[in-house]
Amino acid sequence: MKNLMVLFLILSTLVAVLATEQVSTTSTHPGTMSAVWHRTSGEYVALCHQAYNLATTVLAEKVKKINPKNSNKRPAIVLDIDETVLDNFNYIIEFMASGQKFSVSSWKKWVAKRSTPALAGAKDFLQFADKLNVEIFYISNRADDEVNDTFENLRSLSIPVKKENLLFKSNSSSKDSRRIQVEKNHEILLFVGDNLIDFSSKFDLQSVKQRVNIVNEIRAEFGAKFIIIPNSMYGDWESAIYKYDSKLSTKEKEHLLLRALTN
């Protein structure tokens, strides 16, 4: 009850600020609370384990039901990488603490370190999939020139990976063409990701409301074919609030975040 009262007071304050069109100009980064939650909460770790425990159970059942006589396609799984298999929290904290925004150069330096740790549960699940002789594909919007560093990073963590199965972004951020590429010779049993666009092109560049509507329409897929990893720090859920305008200032973003609470 005490926590609910505190939450109510916080939301009341935010609504009051919105009503007067006064947006905070403090140095607090909009993602601070999300970052603290990711860094400190046992709940986040539990959710990651829960997702991968479920993925393990679902995959095992699906593999049991495969009849080789009915298909010449090899079974496969598709995963995103960032905040799904690899945990980039330390990079995010670096640029938040310095007051800087994301930049391609700083990101490439981070990837080149080849030292990003794995999310809780990810390695065990992927090793389990590998033992079942399930092909593992990583469809990520990391750039093509980051394949080698990512490959070595995953190998250093004893995560099963083939360099040819790292399908990174070349032109379009949409993952649909790469999913289709995998489906030509494989039956995809399971998708794992932290962003709805990791599962279907239906979610590409959709509004906040449309994203929720689509989730409700295909709700039976979640936990059955789609396994989602929690990520409240960044993603298309946030970009949708900004209407995918990457040029907005921090002040403009804060204003839209406040407005999103009342819509």
Image (cartoon, rainbow, N blue to C red):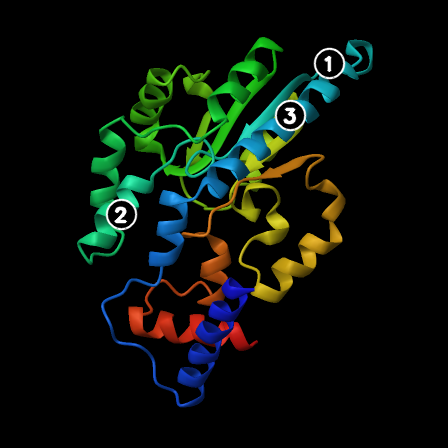
Question: If the image is split into quadrants, where does the N terminus sit?
Answer: bottom right
Residue at the location (50% across, 26% down)? 121
The amino acid marked with disc number 1 is Asn
Residue type, mark 2 in image: Ile
- Up-down relation of residue 4 to residue 45 (above or below): below
Residue tagged by mark 3? 184
Q: Residue 154, located in which quarter of the rendered image?
A: top left
Tag 2 or tag 3, which sits nearer the N-term?
A: 2
- What is the CA distance from the residue labelled 3 to the residue labelled 2? 40 Å
> How many residues crowd mark 1 within 10 Å: few (<14), some (14–19), many (20+)?
few
Q: Residue at x 75, y 54 (%)?
A: 217
Location of mark 1 (residue):
72
Cα separation between marks 3 and 1: 11 Å
Crowding around mark 2 (Cα neighbors within 10 Å: few <14, some 14 to 19, many 20+) is some
Nearer to us of marks 3 and 2 is 2
Residue to which mark 2 is pinned: 93
* Secondary structure under the numbered disc 2 in the rendered image: helix
Foreground of the two, 17 or 43: 43
Relative vertical location of residue 191 with respect to residue 197 in this rendering, above or below:
above
Q: Quick one: which residue is furthest to the front in this view?
A: 2
Q: Counting residues from the N terminus, which is met first, the one under dot 2 or under dot 1?
A: 1
Image quarter hosting the C terminus: bottom right
Secondary structure beneath dot 3 equals: loop
Sequence-first tag of 3 and 1: 1
Q: Residue at x 42, y 79 (%)?
A: 13
Give the residue at x 41% y 43%. Answer: 171
Where is residue 6 shown, x and y percent of the image? 47, 69
- The x, y position of residue 18, in whole percent, is 43, 83
